[in-house]
Image (cartoon, grey):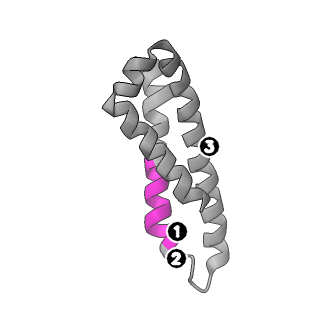
Amino acid sequence: MKIDIFAFFLPRVIQLFIFFYWSNIVLPNLDAQDNASFAEQNTACSYLMNIISLYILIMDIPRLLAAPKLYVKSVTSFVNLTVLFLILINSVD
């Protein structure tokens, strides 16, 4: 149970908070006059979100290899992968 919390749940919660901070605070203030600090925060948030997304994708590989048919048919897996790819696409752009 502890491994599920630390390996799967906690990174997703951290990523959610970083995404919330990035999309609601950093992005709207990028065009402000003091944009140097927000530009640095934008870079840091993007890197952190991408690292966490890649970590979660790597952690899903054993689940995919263990039961590929169940993994592909699972709606939860599809939603998780879709969210990760959307975050990757938005933060890289």
Q: Nearer the viewer, mark 3 or mark 1?
A: 3
Q: Is residue 8 or residue 84 the one in the foreground? A: 84
Query: Which x, y percent locates residue 16?
Result: 43, 48
* Structural distance between the alpha carbons of marks 2 and 3: 23 Å
Q: Nearer the viewer, mark 2 or mark 3?
A: 3
Main secondary-structure element of the magenta-colored stretch: helix
Query: Which x, y percent locates residue 25?
Result: 47, 68
Element at badge 1? helix
Query: Does residue 36 sit above or below 60 in this rendering?
Result: below
Mark yes or no: residue 2 visible: no
Mark yes or no: residue 6 visible: yes
Query: Does residue 51 sit above or below 93 in this rendering?
Result: above
Residue type at numbered disc 3:
Ile
Of callouts 2 and 3, which one flags the residue occurring earlier in the amino acid sequence? 2
Say which mark, if any, is on residue 51: 3
Say which mark, if any, is on residue 29: 2
Say which mark, if any, is on residue 3: none
Task: Give the residues in magenta.
Answer: 16-27
Element at badge 3? helix
Q: Is residue 21 magenta?
A: yes
Find out whether the residues at labels 2 and 1 contact each other: C-beta distance under 8 Å. yes
Say which mark, if any, is on residue 26: 1
Q: Circle 3: is it few (<14), some (14-19), or many (20+) Cα within 10 Å? A: some
